[in-house]
Image (spheres, coloured by chain):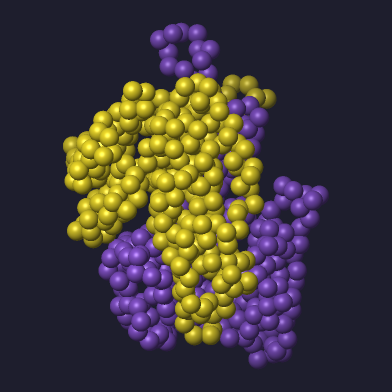
Chain colours: A purple, B yellow
Amino acid sequence: MTNEPTSFSAESYFATQPPPATLDHDIAGVRSFVARQQAAGRKVVLVTSGGTTVPLELNVVRFLDNFSAGTRGATSAEYFLKAGYAVLFMHRQFSLQPFSRHYSHSTNPFLDLLDIDKSTTSSSQDPQIGVTPEKRAHLLQVLTAYKQVQAAGTLHTLTFVTVNDYLWLLRAVSQELSVLNRKAMYYLAAAVSDFFLPRQKMSEHKIQSGKGSLHIEMDQVPKILKPMVDEWTRNGYIVSFKLETDQALLIPKARASIERYGHQVVIGNDLNRRKFEVVFVSRKNLTGASSEGRDNGFEENWLRIDLSTDHEKEIEEDIVKELVKRHGDWTCVDSE
Amino acid sequence: MTNEPTSFSAESYFATQPPPATLDHDIAGVRSFVARQQAAGRKVVLVTSGGTTVPLELNVVRFLDNFSAGTRGATSAEYFLKAGYAVLFMHRQFSLQPFSRHYSHSTNPFLDLLDIDKSTTSSSQDPQIGVTPEKRAHLLQVLTAYKQVQAAGTLHTLTFVTVNDYLWLLRAVSQELSVLNRKAMYYLAAAVSDFFLPRQKMSEHKIQSGKGSLHIEMDQVPKILKPMVDEWTRNGYIVSFKLETDQALLIPKARASIERYGHQVVIGNDLNRRKFEVVFVSRKNLTGASSEGRDNGFEENWLRIDLSTDHEKEIEEDIVKELVKRHGDWTCVDSE
């Protein structure tokens, strides 16, 4: 791992790093899902969620990871479904998922929802399993929404672990979704590593300790928003996220991202305020005006909720509401 | 992060790295749990489980992690409970836990266990939630064991995230458990990082990309088995794990570990064979003989299960059975 770092373009990345073994199978599933949604006239949003890993070994024991439980993605997916979208939910293995997220193993564990009823009259009958009365109303609500989505077939789930899985899947899924033209939205909430270790530099076995300190040198992940906007999707509505811990960097970095890649919205969030405050950064007068007509100005729209007065409220509800509106305007341009 | 690596002893580690904020609170809970089990005459096993993180930033966005879903620890904890042990389950946040592990969000998701019964006769009554018939028997079994353990108060859970949390907790918990003398077992199944980034070398904010490649240099985590055996516990029965990807290293590294730290058992497992094959490495004639009487020989006992014929079997059942037997012999020495 002492080689010189290489600079990877998206093209050279995909030419040198191997695709995940399940890619073809995964994409076949996406293709039929997209076809069904297209036939039904539904808008489709790709929601990416959770962190990506960067394995340090081919037989992976250690990896670099990005902090993310997947709350933003899983919660947003539920609100998109509620708004009538079909959702392609592409998430890190074991990160939170829509609906089941309400019952994590640590908070609100589901076994605590259930009671064994030993009052069964006949001794030959097995005891019944029931739901704890005070948890019933909420569970019924979640379960009803879950069963409706299952029956409608509007949620399709894909799993990634490594940043390499993520990049290959994102490219292939975007290409599949591009048939929907402006009816596709890309909501890129996953926390994707900026760095990776090319396969050619990985050690085969577990790195041994006892030989002093650990040195890791990683290459930069190519900026895939560029080919996504320019090549992979046709007129898709692309929403990216910017997470910072230094609030002063939020707006400048969001603007620079739009300047550089030319996509529609960056949602900026500060690590410690992300549950109650985000900012939408976009070009002024984006929709309705021809691209020649745009000035170079940006606009920022802050969304805030007051958790002290409304502690049940999820900011994702407002994020999705705003995006559904903007995406509606964007698709109208198409039909004019 | 370009400073020279420092070599940390356990002592210098705890003198320079800050304790987790919840340590005192956590240990108060452990103390009363241990007192209750001691009063009841129960043996107690500390089960550590899941991987530890090494944050790269103080406002953590990125971290190094060790591969572990926590299956070994969560499964073993159930079998220890079944064998009459009280279990201190010290696990990585969001890793698998005893009982709920049977229903992860990805495999066997629990919302799929439940049905909404719409056949309720009275329209004023809310629909009932029931358990899918084919899942009922297994759920009833898991739920019954879970409720019994809750009623008996024999499971106490502690959570860690970083390797620093883990080290501070392990030391404090070991010191609490040492009052049980030979009746305490330490089953160290967590996948603990060999490397860490001293707080003094961490960058405050998210490391910015766009400045070329990422260089990380980490220091070695002190070998805490040494002070654990020599100082923190009195006559505790200590079981450590060795995970390798190169099978040839398994036995030599396990032996070297016992040679170096003087604890009772190393369970060696190969990353790709760990679900059906492990090896117990220990000193020959350990129990029954005085420490002067030991020769320097080791013995290896392989445990294997045949998943092709017995695919419901969990190897942790046999691991725990063997350890309960060995620990029984070990506690008999005490009472002689």
Front-most of residues B77 and B284: B284
The single residue placed furthest to the front in the displayed view is B292
How many numbered circles are shown?
0
Residue at (51, 78) in percent of width and height: B3
Front-most of residues A133 and A41: A133
Quadrant containing the N terminus of chain A is: bottom left
Question: For residue B336, what is the image quadrant?
Answer: top left
Quadrant containing the C terminus of chain A is: bottom right
Residue at (63, 71) in percent of width and height: B204
Image check: B206 left or right of B45?
Answer: right
Question: For residue A235, what is the image quadrant?
Answer: bottom right
B139 in relation to A185, above or below: above
Front-most of residues B147 and B9: B9
What x and y, as percent, mark residue B15? 57, 59
A151 in relation to B221, above or below: above
The single residue placed furthest to the right in the displayed view is A309
What x and y, as percent, mark residue B23? 61, 47
Residue at (32, 73) in percent of width and height: A202
Q: Is residue A53 among the parts visible in the rendering?
A: no
Image check: B258 left or right of A249?
Answer: left
Image check: A56 left or right of B253?
Answer: right
Residue at (45, 24) in percent of width and height: B42
B39 in relation to A46, above or below: above
Q: Is residue A290 among the parts visible in the rendering?
A: yes
Front-most of residues B253 and A13: B253
What x and y, as percent, mark residue B93? 52, 49
The single residue placed furthest to the top in the displayed view is A122
What x and y, as percent, mark residue A284? 72, 81
The single residue placed furthest to the bottom in the displayed view is A292
